[in-house]
Image (tube, rainbow, N blue to C red):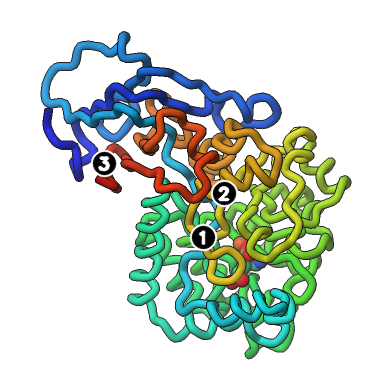
Amino acid sequence: MSSAHGRPATGTLLIRDLAQVATPRAPGPARGVALRDVAVVEDAYVLVRDGAIASVGPMRDLPQLDGDVAELDGRGLSAIPGLVDCHTHPAFAGDRAHEFALRAGGATYEELLAAGGGILSTTRATRAAGPATLEAIVARHRDAMLAHGTTTFEGKSGYGLDRDTELAQLSAVRAAGGIPTWLGAHAVPPEQPDADAYVEWAVAEVLPEAAHTAVAADVFVEGGTFDVAQARRYLMACRDAGLALRLHGDQLSEIGAVPLAVELGARSVDHLESTGPAGIGLLGESDVVAVLLPVAALYLARPMPPARALVDAGAVVALATDFNPGSAFCESLPVVCTLACTQLGLVPEEALSACTVNAAYVLGLEDRGRLTPGARADVVLLDASDWRHLAYHLAGDLIHTVVQDGTIAFSRA
Ligand code: NIG
Ligand code: FE
């Protein structure tokens, strides 16, 4: 048996004698009963060839393998697909520990932003950092996510709010292997007269370049940032430039983000902590993905999003960390899965589908999120014989090994 660590994505890798392999069965977008349709194989193997899943099955069906085969011993472990974090803000400098302490003492997120703190304080630090520092920062956060089982991450800009820093953020996400989203409309920077003027400036001066690097555009629809008319103007310009559309909506207040997302055929509307029955009904009948971010609700001590009602209404639901320095300083999708099963009313199977196959769908990636022949070989080995420890073990030291694109990218041992 040869060691598989750091091996290139060519050749054959056998992960053998796994206690369980668990994978969503249906391709994305999974909704309704398909969301909880997870196939579990006991005493199983996963065979990887040239960076792709070749086959998955019980050990008794393992085919005869010839030639050089690297092996991983899966005894006592369970395998799930590499996790997909479809909503993060990793391209920031500095931190907000001081504001965290102020919030712990009673200040609110909205008060801090209105006083020039919050997103704007991170913007000052990020503008000062420079492109090389931003690249190093995103790579560091990427590595932390990987150690929590995340093999694909989306990363937003939105802490530059000027041309060069926004573009540097997008490039830093791309350089770290992430999927960049231009969050050009995150907040109004102090040098701009108002939100309308800022949106006009951003679509004229930043969008043409941003559209070369980003795959999607995002806007923070909220009182004090961008209203529905401003968000519509921004998103329609981004759609014309070829970007998929996403919205931060109904986080703090319900001011029309969900109807706008449906009207524009957005890929997703994210947060939804304040979404009421009308918004749930709209999402239940649309293809717009409801991306739920329970860490942000926990961290800001706000109500959890109506996840159970959304799933039961037929909405396509995904889960993500919202990793950022202000409202969700947490890289862990396993923690998100625990919150999904304890606070959102989802079962572990629904949580798994929501942060694998459905999260990949949000990013337009059909080649991952399931352990199925032909898929990109992204595999997480959990240090537990029952894969549901993913959600069950709150903040546990669970990630044993991560295979990314056929290569062992993280190993705890
Ligand atoms: O998704 N709500 C807007 N944006 C981020 C937070 C950004 C920040 O506080 O730095 C979010 O929660
Ligand atoms: Fe966010």
Residue drawn at x 68%, y 25% is 33
What amino acid does circle 1 point to? Answer: Cys
Residue that mark 3 sits on: 407
Does residue 336 lie above or below 70 as drawn?
below
Real-space Cα separation, disc 1 to disc 2, in angstroms:
9 Å
What amino acid does circle 2 point to? Answer: Val
Residue that mark 2 sits on: 336
Left or right side of 82 for 350: right
Of circles 2 and 3, the one toward us is: 2
| Element carrying mark 3 | strand
What amino acid does circle 3 point to? Answer: Thr
Does residue 233 lie above or below 261 as drawn?
below
Instruction: Give the class, few, some or many, for how many residues have Cα within 10 Å of label 1's Cα (few <14, many ≥20).
Output: some
| Element carrying mark 1 | loop
Real-space Cα separation, disc 1 to disc 3, in angstroms:
25 Å
**In the image, farthest residue toward the right:** 278
Residue that mark 1 sits on: 330
x, y percent for residue 189: 63, 83
Real-space Cα separation, disc 2 to disc 3, in angstroms:
25 Å
